[in-house]
Image: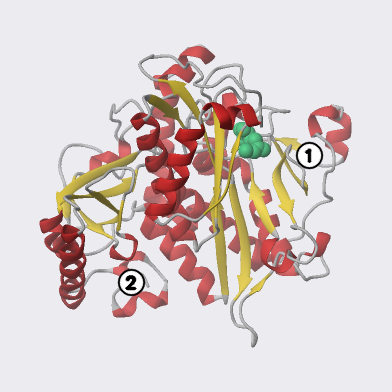
Amino acid sequence: MEQTSETATSGTGLDAYALGGRERTRLAARAAVAARRMAGEGIVGVALTWVDVSGITRTKTVPVERLEHAAAWGVGMSPVFDVFLLDDSIVSGRHVGGPVGDLRLHPVLERLAPMAALPGWAHAPALRYAQDGTPHPLDARALLRRETDRLAALGWSVKAAFEIEWAVSKGGADGFVPACRGPAYGMTRVTELAGYLRDVLAALKETGVTVVQLHPEYAAGQYEVSVEPEDPLGAADTAVIVRETIRAVTMEHGMAASFSPKVEAGSVGNGGHVHLSLWREDTSDGPKNAMAGGSGPYGMTAAGEAFAAGILGRLPALLAVGAPAVASYLRLVPSHWAGAFACWGLENREAALRFITGAEGERETAANLEVKCVDSAANPYLLLAALLAAGRNGLGMDLRLPEPVDVDPAGLSEQERAARGIAPLPSSLAESVAAFEADAVLRDALGEAVVDTVATVRRGEIALLDGATPEEIAAATRWRH
Ligand code: GLU
Ligand code: MG
């Protein structure tokens, strides 16, 4: 289980997760055992990572001998990183900014693991606390934990997985030079980079990631990996580990990996689709997937439908978190399988929400909702926290879904779309931010400091790239996430 204090189960606010004295002692003891074991296995350093508002994974590392102290007392890091932009310039919000202050990064020991792609290194996602042991209100992992606890208090759990797309470039070039020439989904592309892809699979497996599929994607040099669903915290941790592992193996092979929403202007982008299923926990015969076995559309239960409808209705606001870069809106265009319209459909790759039932016979485990309009510039913790909050609101309001859409909405006339209630999603970051700031449900779930800081960082990046051409935006974003 998570490292929480005795009172953490109430799930009412972040203070419930404060680190007390006894907890520090317990964490130190546990870290000491893990550090001794890892040192024996050749681990020298441990990277403590967290993801900032701009979606960049930041880190402090400690020698393995120092893990025990870090677990109990944390490692210092400035709160100013919450207002870093993707080019490392710094803005200032109402709640964060400026050079003063200290937060403590505490490794999450349950997720501490050697990183096969970085020999001698282990990794642990970090939680950020104030010096008095209270969680930092902008700590995205803590916010996600609170959201999963809020759902748990209602008898629900969620399984989630991020699909990671990336494009591989020949090394040494500033620009993007596809590392393979084979066609989309072509076996040629596996053959061309077989050794590399084998090493990606092997490193992920050795790091403890359960891969379910790896394939060549549509755009030049693009691949995708999908992983087994997990609890939301685990899924977000895995999204971080998968990207760092792919990045390291790619570099080891003399190439470079881009996870940017738009690697090249004018091409198909990298998505970071999120798969979600909602599970009823308090049944006599074990957890039950609310996305199957019901009498709603395509077998959803009423709760599954309400959860999906809660997300669908808030997609414009959710994009401020899920499609957080200026470059995200170069990707989020119609007829690019990015889901640029606010609608849902069964297996519809042009709907922002694609419903997946799975094959007959495995629906009870396989049925899930895929959020397609989001990308890997998103902070995976914050995105899941926001999606869960939107779904929880849908559950509370017992919302119903509109009619499903079974065509590419771009192929309908504007009048036909209007008649079917299909709206385009925001076409710019500024539009998403405005929707996010106006969204009372997300504000209530995430807190004022998060909403203000997200909006501040987004406006900073909009200003940073103001007037830039699509090519310049792609170039500024290509190697950052
Ligand atoms: N690359 C597409 C995107 O930008 C997704 C392709 C797919 O459906 O997997 O989201
Ligand atoms: Mg894909």
- 234 up-or-down from 418: above or below: below
Give coordinates of residue 384: x percent, y percent.
51, 53
Q: Secondary structure at mark 1?
A: loop
Q: Is label 2 in contact with label 1 (beta carbons under 8 Å)?
A: no
Residue found 28% across the figure and 75% down from its top: 5
Residue 87 drawn at (x, y percent): 33, 25
The mark tally for this picture is 2
Give the quarter of the image for residue 270.
top right
* Number of other residues with Cα within 10 Å of mark 2, as a class: few under 14, some 14 to 19, many 20 or more: some
Q: Which mark identifies residue 422? A: 1
Can you identify the residue that label 2 sits on? 16
Q: Point out the tag, 2 or 1, that comes first from the N-terminus.
A: 2
* Dot 1 alpha-carbon crowd within 10 angstroms: few under 14, some 14 to 19, many 20 or more: many
Compared across the picture, whether 4 is left or right of 32 comes to right
State yes or no: Cβ of the residue under disc 1 lies below 8 Å from any atom of ligand 1: no
* Quadrant, the N terminus: bottom left
Residue 17 image position (x, y, % from top left): 31, 69
SS for callout 2: helix
Mark-to-mark CA distance, 2 and 1: 41 Å
**Residue depicted at x 76% and y 64%:** 300
Residue 93 visible in the shown view: no
For the residue marked with disc 1, what is the amino acid? Ile
Closest to the observer: 168 or 148?
A: 168
* Residue drawn at the location 43% of the way across and 33% of the way down: 458
Q: How is the image coloured?
A: secondary structure
